[in-house]
Image: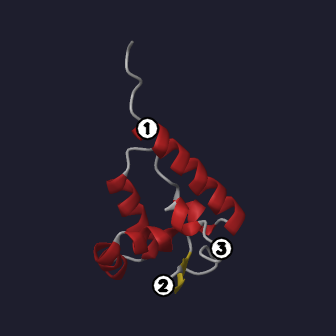
Amino acid sequence: MFEAASAPGALRMSSWHTCGTTHCRAGWVVHLAGDAGYALERFFNTELAAMKIYDASSDLPKVSPVHFYDGNEAALADMKRMADLEAAANAPEPQAA
């Protein structure tokens, strides 16, 4: 998600979805989950759908919904932090010599 949201003009925290290439943090979570994400959004709302997707897709510490209301800079910094944690958690273990 960080890669998609960090593209120029891709993150706009003031609106869930601005267009197909610009979303807020929760909007990106829903968008990247595809049809299933949008179905959850229609059934619940954007915030709850994003929380459920985060819960189901990662064993990392959960993202507090208050972060769905951060400014662009703070949101992007936290998404980068989470991407780094995810990469570290999924890195192959070093082979013993």
Point 42% across, 75% down: residue? 31
SS class, disc 2: loop
Q: Give the percent coordinates (x, y) of residue 42.
A: 34, 82
Q: Give the percent coordinates (x, y) of residue 8.
A: 65, 73
Point 39% across, 33% down: residue? 92
- Residue count near mark 2 (Cα–Cα under 10 Å), binned few <14, some 14–19, many ≥20: few
Q: Which mark is residue 8?
A: 3
- Residue count near mark 3 (Cα–Cα under 10 Å), binned few <14, some 14–19, many ≥20: few
Q: Amino acid at mark 1?
A: Ala
* Of the image marks 1 and 3, the number of the one nearer the N terminus: 3
Q: Amino acid at mark 3?
A: Pro
- Residue extending furthest toward the top: 97
Q: Give the percent coordinates (x, y) of residue 59.
A: 38, 44
Classify residue 68 by image quadrant.
Answer: bottom right
Compared to residue 33, the image places residue 41 above or below, namely below
Q: Which mark is residue 89?
A: 1
Q: Which mark is residue 47?
A: none
Compared to residue 16, the image places residue 68 above or below, namely above
* Of the image marks 2 and 1, the number of the one nearer the N terminus: 2
Depth check, mark 3 against mark 2: the one in front is: 3
- Left or right of residue 8, residue 16 in this image: left
- Left or right of residue 85, residue 48 in this image: left
Point 28% across, 73% down: residue? 36
Disc 1 from disc 3: Cα separation = 27 Å
Point 56% across, 73% down: residue? 24
**Circle 2 residue:** 20
